[in-house]
Amino acid sequence: MNRTAACALASLAALFLGRPAGADDLPRYHQPSESFETKVVECDVLVYGGTPAGVTSAIQAARLGKKVILLSFNQHVGGMTSGGLTASDLGTENSIGGMALEFYSRLGKNVNFSPSSAESLFREMLDEAGVEVLLGRCLQSVKMDGVRLTSIHLGTGETVQAKVFMDTTYEGDLMAAAGVSYHVGREPVGTYGESLAGQWQQVSWKGVYQFCGLPLSPFKEPGNPGSGLLPGIAVGKGNAGDGDHKLQAFNFRMYLSNRDDKVPFPKPPGYDPNRYALLARFLHADPGLTWTLNYTVKPMTDGPVQMRNGDSNNAGSFSSDYVGGNYTWADGTYEDVTFSELPAPRRGLPVSFSDLYKTRERIFQDHVGYQLGLMYFLANDPQVPDALKQRVHRFGLDPEEFNETGFWPHQLYVREGRRMHSSYVMTQANCESRTVAEDSIGLASYAMDSHFCQRVVVEEAGVTTVRNEGGFGHPCPKPYPISYRSIVPKKAECTNLLVPVCLSSSHVAFGSIRMEPVFMILGQSAGVAASMAIDEAIPVQAVVYGKLRKSLLDLQQSL
């Protein structure tokens, strides 16, 4: 190990093994707010959420002459695009226009760029537009005048008043605080007539990342139910097609390197190799298994993780996705039920923001421990075959990225949170172009994609084994329009809020829409709509689509 790698490892070890909770370089979800002088700030457009949609919506509104403030929950802007997801999920490239295309053109590439270069460009574009960016701002409460948002109060003591607000968080926190309807989890198959909906759908991903079809016992003592289940495995509930409140799995998009100065995967505090007992069993289940350390769909092959220079994703039956570890992330609650009819939408906050942030911090750190522990396990545990350990050892964390958080990504990949329920719901029919939204504000084209939602005990050919459930990856035949109505709440709920990330969509359709380039597209279009609503002093629901369409086309948005 050279001196650079040794210093980097020492820094990472200090990070995970004893730095105080408030250390600046500790990877955290929620950093408690510093004390600021209580004050009221006014602007035209308030954007809450530093995701790519937040960046593009803020820039666009500012370019149209509005005073814009962008609030980011953490110390960064760019969400997953600056948080490790740089193998961009583009779908059909010619469906990307407007500011998203501008961003990738200025970056010089649309895939495999560095997270730090993406964040630097986002900051440059925000500065050019004159957007005021405030970091480490956490929502505490909102003030409403009837169905109109008037201000939000932050943990810093600041109050921000605006004419139009944008919720560009991955979770939909502002819209929930404003009393906008939303759902969490999966709709039953009958809600929108979606073949991919609900549990145990059979259209896509059947047999993919299912432990190569091998009969792995789910019990601590193989074949002995009395010994209890291995960690991470549950007893399934409900019938095929039933809905539930489960979320598809989250992970961190690690940024890896095989250079000499790489940072070896450290042993995290509280490391417990038993968390990976199912993987250990899988690694020795059959001598014919081939480990690719990458995506694969070939029989008798598996990841178990993706290891490559740069953005490294989940890739296997038991991988960096922490299946079942995130159910309370969206709004702080979870009820373990299944249903054949979709319950009424939720409204409001079931827990306080203070409690919600504590819950998410616990989940965030649990994901750090799980995934870093997984990498340490693969690189060091005697249960891992030597040849595989040697291959894993070739990689480590990139010492040139995420320096402020110990080379570990600062953003957890929240693939899905709340989803607004508005007057227009995007569904599988939209993705398959069987239903076409006539008020397009941009195109999506990536496959309908859900990661696993649960890992459960099943019976196959009379044998009790374990399988993953909830994954699908079903292509869209062509780019399809996203409705303007899907990013605005019902008029009876809030008239000056736009929601371009947690938009009104089924779980199935959101699996296609939830891509970072699409969020950039929807953010820019929302910025135009917000400016129009301000200029004409009208609710966002009353924006005339013909005028909006013309403005978007003038900005080279693909509709």
Image: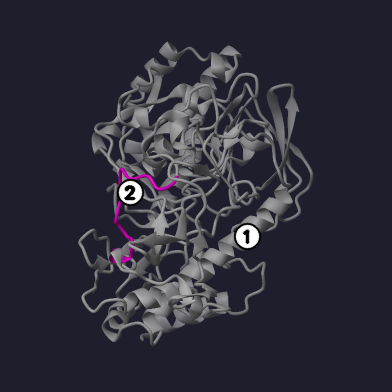
- Disc 2: CA contacts within 10 A as few (<14), some (14-19) or many (>=20): some
Q: Quadrant of the N terminus?
A: bottom left
Q: Which residue is mark 2?
A: 88
**Residue 66 or 58: which is nearer the viewer?**
58
Residue depicted at 29% across the width and 47% down the height: 110
What crowding class fits label 1: few (fewer than 14 Cα within 10 Å), some (14-19), or many (20 or more)? Answer: some
What secondary structure prevails in the magenta region? loop
Position above or below: 132 against 78: above
Looking at the image, which is closer to me, 409 or 77?
409
Q: Quadrant of the C terminus?
A: top left
Q: Which residue is mark 1?
A: 361
Q: Is residue 352 above or below residue 341?
A: below
Residue 431 coordinates in the image, percent (x, y): 34, 32
Q: Residue at left 78%, top 47%? A: 37
Give left or right: position of 285 versus 42. left
Q: Residue furthest front?
A: 462
State the CA–CA distance, disc 2 to disc 1. 27 Å
Quadrant of res 22 = bottom right
Was residue 351 drawn as part of the magenta stretch in this picture? no
Residue 282 shown left or right of residue 407 in the figure:
left
Q: Would you say residue 27 is visible in this rendering? A: no
In percent of width and height, residue 317 lies at 35, 63
**Place of residue 16 in the rendered image (x, y in percent of width and height, measured from the top left):** 56, 75
Q: Which residues are magenta?
A: 199-212
Left or right, residue 176 beside residue 253 = right
Amino acid type, residue under disc 2 in the picture? Ser
* Helix, strand or loop under label 2: loop
Q: Quick one: label 2 or label 1, which is nearer the N terminus?
A: 2
- Rendered position, 271 above or below 254: below
Residue 56, given in percent of the width and then of the height, sits at: 45, 36
Q: Quadrant of residue 169?
A: top right
